[in-house]
Image (cartoon, grey):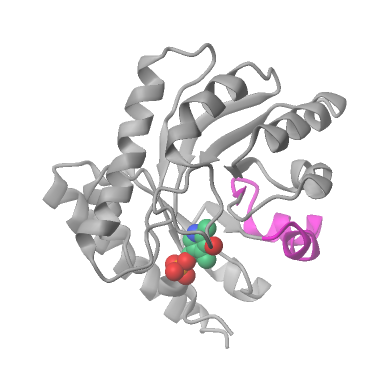
Amino acid sequence: MTLPTAEIRTRIEVIRRRIAVACERAGRDPQEVTLMAVTKTVPPEAIKAAGAAGIVVFGENRVQEAAAKLSPAFLQEVGDTAQWHLIGHLQTNKVKKALELFQVIQSVDSLRLAETLQRQAAVLPKTIEVFLEINTSGEAAKFGVPPEQAVALAQAVAALPNLQLTGLMTIGALTDNPDTIRRGFRQLRDLRAEITAMNLSGVKLRHLSMGMTDDFELAIAEGSTMVRMGRAIFGDRG
Ligand SMILES: *Cc1c(COP(=O)(O)O)cnc(C)c1O
């Protein structure tokens, strides 16, 4: 199912207003919050509609799907200011392809993956911006490094010259309880403060990537700087 271009534009306007209201309630500047369009399973026409409505940051979950969609011609159509972020789990055997496709990898969740990224990025050579994915909910079905290992991973990644650590990412707990969801988001914010206080060389944690269609207002209340929105923009998947 693909929504018409005008409908996608309207939905983005509605989300921007909701972001502004959530920011106002939290005493924050809406400019601090980037709206990412999550385009997994979304066809090219709808992605272009989001680009035309002013979206510049796009998120994909799977390297293979992104490789199929992001042809040079398509990238040109979406516009050369567009940024592509990998937000799904990255297997080490897909690192090389991921480095070709994405400007930011938000799902770094192990030293092994970070070291593989370093090795391949050095070959190209290029510097890749990365976020650490933290499993703040503790749910077994979720990827991400456990919060108690986040500081050590940040220290290790800071020492890798071709990786530039600029943010933390998490997925909200799967529950209807807003307090539980907020606790996870707050934990990500606290981890950013803890890592920032360490003054790791070359590390500047500009981003807290948290909040999706069902919980982005809670995430903004807890300091999110990037909300990752799929269904709210493009409708239900599949
Ligand atoms: C799918 C996905 C999103 C978007 O989810 P919606 O509920 O559709 O807004 C955000 N982040 C990640 C990591 C995802 O996999």
Question: Going 61% across and 68% down the picture, which residue do you hit?
Answer: 40
Residue occupying the point 43% across, 53% down:
138
Residue at horizontal 83%, vertical 48%?
93
Q: Residue furthest right?
A: 123
In the image, residue 41 above or below residue 197: below
**What quarter of the picture does the N terminus occupy?**
bottom right
Q: Quadrant of residue 70?
A: bottom right
Magenta span contains residue 77:
yes
**Would you say 55 lies left or right of 114 here?**
left
Q: Position of residue 158 (x, y in %)?
A: 58, 19
**Of residues 154 and 207, which is closer to you in this image?**
154
100 sits left or right of 36 in the view = right
> Which residue: 50% across, 20% down?
203
Residue 61, x across and y down, in percent: 63, 60
**Horizontal placement of 197 versus 178: left or right?**
right
Q: Can residue 230 be seen at all in this image of the molecule?
A: no
Q: Is residue 17 magenta?
A: no
Which image quarter holds the C terminus?
Answer: bottom right
> Could you say which quadrant of the image residue 161 lies in?
top right
Residue nearest the viewer, comparing 136 with 76: 136
Q: Residue furthest bottom?
A: 1
* Total marks placed: 0
Q: Is residue 156 visible?
A: yes
Q: Which residues are magenta?
A: 62-85
**Which of 229 and 83 lies nearest the eye of the viewer?**
229
Give the percent coordinates (x, y) of residue 205.
44, 28
Would residue 27 be found to the left or right of residue 127 on screen? left
Residue 148, position as x, y percentages in the image: 43, 34
